[in-house]
Amino acid sequence: MPAKVTLNGYLDELASSSPAPGGGSVAALSGALGAALTAMVCRLTIGKKKYASVEEEMKNVLRQAEKLRIRFVDLQELDTAAFSKVMEAYSLPKETDPQKALRFSAVREAIKEATLVPLEVMKHCIDGLALTRQVASAGNDNSVSDAGVAALMLHAAAEGAALNVRINLSTLNDTDFVGWKSGEMESLLQTCRKMLTETQGVVDGKIEGEKLPTK
């Protein structure tokens, strides 16, 4: 969400009748939340004697997670801006044939541009999920559930972004663009799902192994 907007303010706007921010914004925000949780696990690991052997790895993951968090926030704003451009294109006059042609072209290009934003969200979700796998494996065991939640948030971001790609592509009659971007979306989605399963396996294994003593 924009830096000067409070959480409650954002939620009020999201719940309003305004179509933006909408699902695309929430998808990007989910990615930012996942990246932020990943950074938290790193910070809860760095400086601990027990995890000295992975400190440099966690510092590197932390740097990457923070960059991702910033990028997801940027993409959240870009998604809203891209949607606004689509709405502006639809509002162009269509009384004459030249106007209709101009409007059709403007709408098509705006929708294509709006499709690229959620696709980028999905690409960054893959980067983020790779980091959750690292922190789940090597990070502070007491925070492994946070690593799991981070992975779930990034997966939700990818699934949500994919829905936005699909609905945008459904309005286009550019066969080449639709085919190309549909294939890209499906590939990214399958990768994200596979990576979530991997991280969940690590998280479940650690949680099930943490048994309190009976006496």
Image: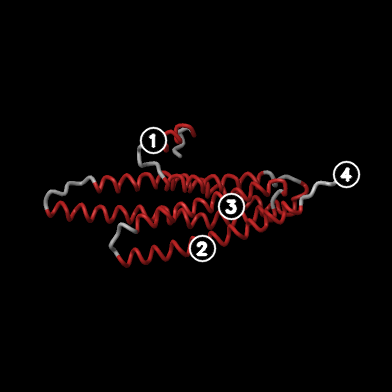
Residue at (19, 53) in percent of width and height: 102
Q: Which mark is residue 215?
A: 4
x and y percent of residue 160 in the render?
A: 46, 51
Q: Amino acid at mark 4?
A: Lys
Give the amino acid type for the residue marked by disc 3 in the picture: Ala
Mark 3 surroundings: few (<14), some (14-19) or many (≥20) residues within 10 A:
many
Q: Residue at x 48, y 32 (%)?
A: 8
Q: What whole-number distance in Å separates the C-alpha atoms at marks 2 and 4?
A: 45 Å
**Numbered label attached to residue 212:** none
Q: CA distance from mark 4 to mark 3?
A: 34 Å
Dot 2 surroundings within 10 Å: few (below 14), some, or many (20 or more)?
few
Which callout, 4 or 3, points at the residue further toward the start of the chain? Answer: 3
Q: Earlier in the sequence, mark 2 or mark 4?
A: 2
Can you identify the residue that label 3 sits on? Answer: 151
Secondary structure found at label 1:
loop
Residue under label 1: 16
Residue to which mark 2 is pinned: 190
